[in-house]
Each structure stands twice: as structure tokens, then as C-alpha cells.
Image (cartoon, rainbow, N blue to C red):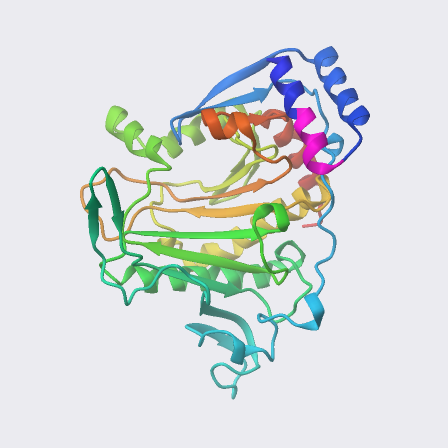
Amino acid sequence: MALLLGEKLAEVSYYWNVSIGSVLKLSHDFERRNSVAEIRKDLLRDSWVVIATGRAIRPTDLPVPSQGKPLKAQGFCPFCEGNEAVTPPELMANRRPGTEKNTPGWTIRAIPNKFTAFSRNTEFATETNGIYSFMTGFGSHEVVVETPEHDIELHQQPAEKISEIIEMLKRRHLDLAQDQRIKFIQTYKNKGLFGGASLGHSHMQIVSLPYVPNELKGLDSYAQATGNCLICDMLKQEKQDQVRLVLESENFIVICPFASRFAHETWVIPKYHARDFGDLPAEQIPELAAILRKVLVSMVDILNDPSYNLVINTAPVNVENRPDHHWFIEVFPRLIVQAGLEISTGYYMNLISPEWAAETLKEKISQLPD
């Protein structure tokens, strides 16, 4: 197993164009300090993750370039205030009094993705061609532009602004769920080049689909086998073990999950069973915003402004007779490019244990002002 993790470090040298000598030193240090790893079962995805169980590598050892301050490419960005005419017409926005749709004066704005592959004007249908199956591109793809300001990232916003963003995401979720043809809504954020962001202006995305993906199949199989909610049982275990628990508030818990696929992967979970993000009580939004801000500020500081993905996992909509779900938010930094092993086997390699990630994140959060 030490050899596999050493090979992963060699991949780091190639992808990040850093000295092979410095990366080999990391590999040698790893084998000297911790030759033991664990292959942990990812109950959520019914898969496996290879995890370095000791403190073999520090977060600052990973040679990941900082994303730096985003710059306005060539002086133009379609998401900036004043460029509303170059985007599709807005679906929903928070505006200053007296301003009209698709003009300056907004604080947050939801628009269709101009280059989407999905359309709700397309009739949903499935077809086959011999052994192959395909379906029409029914669905939707929206962009929520978080702020008129180009060079402010989500973690740099005050909690009040993050509350506004969460509230808009909830409103769009509820609006999309009114269409009975839609069965699944996925909200996510790509930050930085290696998180998949194509524009530097901070934004979220929402995709709605006419079918339910099978990515979180462990939720269903666990509920069918035990009659329990997997996420609720995870929270019981994490509160008992304590070693991966980062933060707990009145209504939310933050953990680094046992089978983390990514170094410093972090989940923000409603403490009490809640199946649908759209049911998030309005009075809990400020609490969630404050917690999410602490997580992002600390993670960005520890990891030197990495690319990351933020994903809101929630129950299917307009679907009957399915096991219950428990919505939660995942944040996972993109510190190393997934390569041959992950693609061919589905086994992720995590060079930093979730126990250590939780310890460092908890310490950093404790240093933040209230």
C-alpha cells in the first residue's frame, strides 16, 4: 500500500510540474513515517477509499498551486453588473427598489445557463438502438450569480450575504420541484480551475433531471437493509467517536467523513433528520451560513486557496415509494488529479486521513472570531 501511495505522489510531480526530487522526498517520508494505510468502505456510494491513516503528509506538503485572486479576463465578464444583456433573461433576482429585470441593481441573480445541454421545452423520452439506450435532453441548467462584484469569492463574503445565497438556492429548488417531470435537483459550486470552474466570477449551478442518479445508492440499500437513515446513523457514530467531528451547533454538525474520497473533504449535515433541502427552515439559514463560512474560510487558509467543489445532496422530488433521504452539503478540495487507479477501479486515494483533517480544521475554526 505504501508503494501505491508513493506512486500517487509521483503523479503529483507530473501534473503539477514540480521537482521530482521534492515529491520523491515526500514519498520517502511517507514510507518512513507511515507504511500502513486502510481501505475503508464508503457506505454512501457503496465503494472503497484508500486512506493514509497516519500523519504521513501535511496539507502544506501537497504542491498545489494557489488559485490566487481571480482576475477579470480581458476586462469583460458576462456575470458582472452591467452585462445583463449578454446573459439569458433572469429567472429570479434580489434587486434594489426601482430597478427592472435584466438591468443593473441586483444583489443576486438566477439565470439559465447559456450553454446548457438540457431544456424543459424538450419532451422527455427514452429510446434504444440494439444494445444501446439513450434519452432526450430534458431538464434544466441554471446559474446563480452570487454577487455583482467580480473579485469576491464565497468564503470572503459575510455570513449575511451567504444567507442570501442559500435562500436563493432554496427558492430555485422549490420552484424547479413544482415541475412534476423533474425527479432530481443537484446544486453545486465549482471553484477554481481544478474544481471545473470556467469563469472566475463566483457562482453556483443548479441542474434538474427527469431521473434519479444512482451515485448515492448506499442511502437506499442501507435503509432497505436496516430500516434506518444512513446519515442519521453516521452522525450517531461520529458523535460517539469524536475524532472526525469538527463542529456542532444547535441544528448542524460538521464532520470529515470516515471514508473521505478527498483530502480535507468536509460535510455539513442537519443534526435532525431532514430529507429535502427545500424544507430548510428559514430561521436556520443564518446558522447554516455562519457554519459554512467558517468551514470555507478555514479550509481556504489551511490549503492555500485551493480549487474545490461544494455540493448540496438532497432527496429526489416527485418520486413515490423510495427510502427516505437526509440532505447534506459536501465540500471537497481538489488537491490531486484523479488518475489511472481511481478511473479504472473506482477506488479513491486520500493522502490525508479524515481524522487528521478534522483535527486541523477544528483547530483553525477555533481561532476564528465569533
Q: Is residue 39 left or right of residue 217?
A: right
| Quarter occupied by the N terminus | top right
Q: Is residue 121 left or right of residue 78?
A: left
Q: How many marks?
A: 0
Q: Position of residue 195 (x, y in %)?
A: 58, 47
Residue positioned most to the bottom: 98
Q: Quadrant of residue 25?
A: top right
Magenta range is: 9-17
Q: Is residue 97 left or right of residue 57?
A: left
Confirm whether the magenta stretch covers residue 10.
yes
Residue at 68 percent across and 25 percent down: it is 9
Residue 115 can be seen, yes or no = yes
Residue 367 can be seen, yes or no = no
Asked if 257 appears above or below 98 in the picture, the reply is: above
Residue positioned most to the front: 130
Please tell me which residue lies in front, 12 or 218. Answer: 12
Examine the residues drawn in magenta and state their main secondary structure. helix
Residue at 71 percent across and 69 percent down: it is 74
Confirm whether the magenta stretch covers residue 153.
no
Please tell me which residue lies in front, 159 or 305. Answer: 305
Please tell me which residue lies in front, 223 or 270. Answer: 223
Q: Position of residue 217 (x, y in %)?
A: 33, 33
Residue at 22 percent across and 40 percent down: it is 322
Q: Position of residue 301 (x, y in %)?
A: 72, 44
Q: Position of residue 298 (x, y in %)?
A: 67, 43
